[in-house]
Image: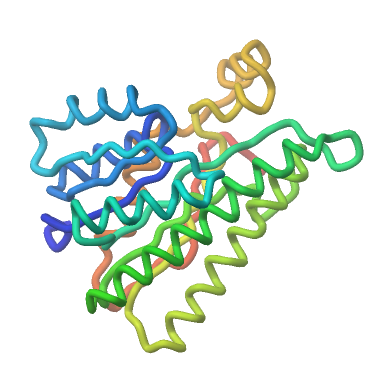
Amino acid sequence: MEKWEGRAALVTGASMGSGRAIAKMLASHGMRVAACARSIEKLQTLTTECMSLRGSILPIKCDLTVREDIEAMFSLIREKLLGVDVCVNNAGLALDAPIIDGHYDDWEVMWQVNVRAVCMCTHLSVKSMLDRGVDDGHIININSLSGHRLGKAHFYSATKYAVTALTEGVRWELRRANSHIKITSISPGLVRTNFAYNLMGREDGEECYNTRQALLPDDMAKSVEFVLATPPHVQVSEMMIRPTEQVV
């Protein structure tokens, strides 16, 4: 991880859960981390917690459903950090929104956060790298096992299947451009974050976590660390991780 010291990273959804753990891990290795989320208060708390680390946190309030917010965020990153060397598309949203009985608004917001924002942040991050002659950057998409098999949340699964396809598509595009920028999809099983609460509600979500083994946010941070620490000739295209007791 020494090669990343002093370099700039963007982590979306960094105010809690996996994103928070990933941002802290990157800062511990000396990276300057643009941490984005809708809650600036939680990001400011994260910034304070990381003040003793080798790197730093730049808190950015950003609503990933708003195109102008994403564009403004990248302008600020360019001004404060010069650009993005590592982009971790961590933010994701799972709602109980079936196809037949679901609601348009739920589908729309999941698509905006889980797919469109990933596309925009990837597009703008790669552009930042290419404009500055950065040939060793890395895009990491926090995907899901639901992007490889169908779970109960069908529309959520559809958005994550899209992330799987987009990740591989971008890898092809980078190779056609003779770029050595890497892209990785990390697909976890159940992680103890707000995921189950958003999908099932507080009571059922708590029951889910109390009766099932789950990964922890720090496990996600370590998976990102592993991917970033690979040598230049090694690209982890897809990583699947699940709790040992999880079957599918």
Residue positioned most to the right: 100
Question: Compared with residue 168, is residue 105 higher up or lower down, i.e. above or below?
Answer: above
Against 32, is 195 above or below? above
**Residue 180 rendering spot, x and y as whole percentages:** 32, 79
Along the line of sight, the residue nearer the viewer: 222 or 176: 176
Residue at 62% across / 66% down in the picture? 165
Q: Residue furthest top?
A: 203
Q: Is residue 39 left or right of residue 24?
A: right
Q: Residue at x 28, y 46 (%)?
A: 34
In front: 119, or 156? 119
Specify the quadrant that holds the N terminus. Answer: bottom left
* Image position of 137 (left or right of 196): left
How was the colour assigned to the protein in this rendering? rainbow
Q: Tell me if 96 is positioned left or right of 247 in this view.
A: right
Q: Position of residue 187 (x, y in %)?
A: 53, 51
> Which residue is depicted at the point 60% across and 54% down?
115
Task: Please state the total of marks drawn on the protein image.
Answer: 0
Horizontal and vertical percent for residue 128?
31, 68
Residue at (74, 42) in percent of width and height: 107
Is 3 drawn above or below residue 94 in the view shown?
A: below
Residue 198 is drawn in which quadrant?
top right
Query: Residue 129, how many percent across, how many down?
Result: 29, 71
Front residue (pair 161, 128): 128
Q: Which image quarter is the C terminus in?
A: top right
